[in-house]
Image (cartoon, rainbow, N blue to C red):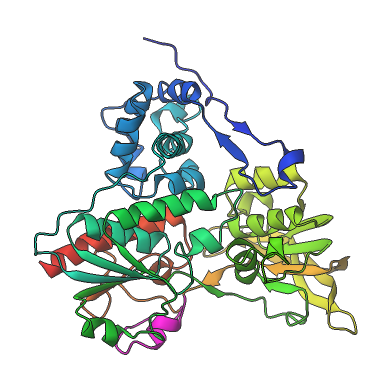
């Protein structure tokens, strides 16, 4: 039996000095030899604990075995039996807390680098098969017309799975390009647009018709869709409603919600102004409030746009940060500063209405709150000010309220989330299903995809 290498096979990255001034992908991916070496670290357990950790039910040992045997085409085929978006998932899924967390190897060594192997298989296919390979499911007359609203990870997954089942699926997207949060919310250096567009094309090749610039609830109502012959509807419109701090100064010039900031940069190409028409303020001293992946993205984009000093302001400590360890590590390497145990009290402006500073409160950690994290408690008399010219608010987002507001009978909870049966994702209207952030609150890409897979099976059963 070959000796197991205790550590993951190293993977190349751009140096911090190079990447902090460009939008190219940070991680460069495995070579074929590196991927094979990493795949051979897998123990190929008879009862693999990694599989239950995958929300989209991938046969993880199966695709890794293909890579170990240099059957790279077999690997991508095995992945696509369950996952229509492997190039995306291999880049943005939190594997460390899902499939890699319970890896048997991790009891003694580092776990298998499952996420990077998934990315390798997807990238290998892209490089060796420039034309997207997919076959539409045969339409034998038994398939039904189904509408999917929203083209983020939940919508794309539900649409693709339903098309595979033989249904006639139309996907409606409010913006001018499909992808949802994948295209407007994740920067190029983490998820290249070329990877996303290829996987969207794969979903189309499966037989999904995509209609952009259609705001369901405004352009078309749910009743309009039913009138056009759709027998079931899946809603995956995500969490696009930014939360605010409700502190003085949030209306000043130079204050962004992370949602607006990321959309301007990612989808509207503001970083290429005036070549593209939407401008963005390129601050010199930027504060980003929050410590999730969105906050890290906003901070690292600010750096690439030319900010001289970028600071993450977070009211808890490093231990409580919700961002992926990899993203925090990359931010630190690139020179992002962290002002921890700090809460903003007010944003300060000049006479022209522009941000010039922020008044802050020093915090300490008390007892755990309902999230399980220690609650931040103000330290009496410990207030101070910092100088900034741009503030980006990344403290979270709520469910998009538009479609529920215009759909009588579609019930939501006190947070605005569509109420669903957790076993089927069926809403209070029998022919409507919902999944992802619109139903469960702000979460991960892969969790939304897992919801959508369950919902797609439920819709198929309902229609039969």
Q: Is residue 107 visible?
A: yes
How far across and down, in percent of the image, does residue 366 sit? 66, 61
Give the main secondary structure of the magenta stretch. loop
**Above/below status of 364 relative to 149:** above
89 lies left or right of 235? right
Residue at (72, 70) in percent of width and height: 279
428 lies left or right of 92? left
Residue at (67, 71) in percent of width and height: 277
Residue at (73, 82) in percent of width and height: 251
Within the magenta stretch, is there residue 447?
no
Residue at (33, 32) in percent of width and height: 73
**Above/below status of 339 relative to 431:** above
Range of the magenta residues?
Answer: 400-415
How far across and down, in percent of the image, does residue 461 sit? 14, 64
Q: Camera-side residue: 437 or 231?
A: 231
Quadrant in the picture for residue 211: bottom left
324 lies left or right of 206? right
How far across and down, in percent of the image, does residue 54 sit? 36, 45
How far across and down, in percent of the image, does residue 89 sit? 44, 47
Q: Which quarter of the figure is the N terminus placed in? A: top left
Q: Which quarter of the figure is the C terminus placed in? A: bottom left
**Above/below status of 350 relative to 200:** below
Q: Is residue 315 visible?
A: no
Within the magenta stretch, is there residue 401?
yes
């Amino acid at each position: 039996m070959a000796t197991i290498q205790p550590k993951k096979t190293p993977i190349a990255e751009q140096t911090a000095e190079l990447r902090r001034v460009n939008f190219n992908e940070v991680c460069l991916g495995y070579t074929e030899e590196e991927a094979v070496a990493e795949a051979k670290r897998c123990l190929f357990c008879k009862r693999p604990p990694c599989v239950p950790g995958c929300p989209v039910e991938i046969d993880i040992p199966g695709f890794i075995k293909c890579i170990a045997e240099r059957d790279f085409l077999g690997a991508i085929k095995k992945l696509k039996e369950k996952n229509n978006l492997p190039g995306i998932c291999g880049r943005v899924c939190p594997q460390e807390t899902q499939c890699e967390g319970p890896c048997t190897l991790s009891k003694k060594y580092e776990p298998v680098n499952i996420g990077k192997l998934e990315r390798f298989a997807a990238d290998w296919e892209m490089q060796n098969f420039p034309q997207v390979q997919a076959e539409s499911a045969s339409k034998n007359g038994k398939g039904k017309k189904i509408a999917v609203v929203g083209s983020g990870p939940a919508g794309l997954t539900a649409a693709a799975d339903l098309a595979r089942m033989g249904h006639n699926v139309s996907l409606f997207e409010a913006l001018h390009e499909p992808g949802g949060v994948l295209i407007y919310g994740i920067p190029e250096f983490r998820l290249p647009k070329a990877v996303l567009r290829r996987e969207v094309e794969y979903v189309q090749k499966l037989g999904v018709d995509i209609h952009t610039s259609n705001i369901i609830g405004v352009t078309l109502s749910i009743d309009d869709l039913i009138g056009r012959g759709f027998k079931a509807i899946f809603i995956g419109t995500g969490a696009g409603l930014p939360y605010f701090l409700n502190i003085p100064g949030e209306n000043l010039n130079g204050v962004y919600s992370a949602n607006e900031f990321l959309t301007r940069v990612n989808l509207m190409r503001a970083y290429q102004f005036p070549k593209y028409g939407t401008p963005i303020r390129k601050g010199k001293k930027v504060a980003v409030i929050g410590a999730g992946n969105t906050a890290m993205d906003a901070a690292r984009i600010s750096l690439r746009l030319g900010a001289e000093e970028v600071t993450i302001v977070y009211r808890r400590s490093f231990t409580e940060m919700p961002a992926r360890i990899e993203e925090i590590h990359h931010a630190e390497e690139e020179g992002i500063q962290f002002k921890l145990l700090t809460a903003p009290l007010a944003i300060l402006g000049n006479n022209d209405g522009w941000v010039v500073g922020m008044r802050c409160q020093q915090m300490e950690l008390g007892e755990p709150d309902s999230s399980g994290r220690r609650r931040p408690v103000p330290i009496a008399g410990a207030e101070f000010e910092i100088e900034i010219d741009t503030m980006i608010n990344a403290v979270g987002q709520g469910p998009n309220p538009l479609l529920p507001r215009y759909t009588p009978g579609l019930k939501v909870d006190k947070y605005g989330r569509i109420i669903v049966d957790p076993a089927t994702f069926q809403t209070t209207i029998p022919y409507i299903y919902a999944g992802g952030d619109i139903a469960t609150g702000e979460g991960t890409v892969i969790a939304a995809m897992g919801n959508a897979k369950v919902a797609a099976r439920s819709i198929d059963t309902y229609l039969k």
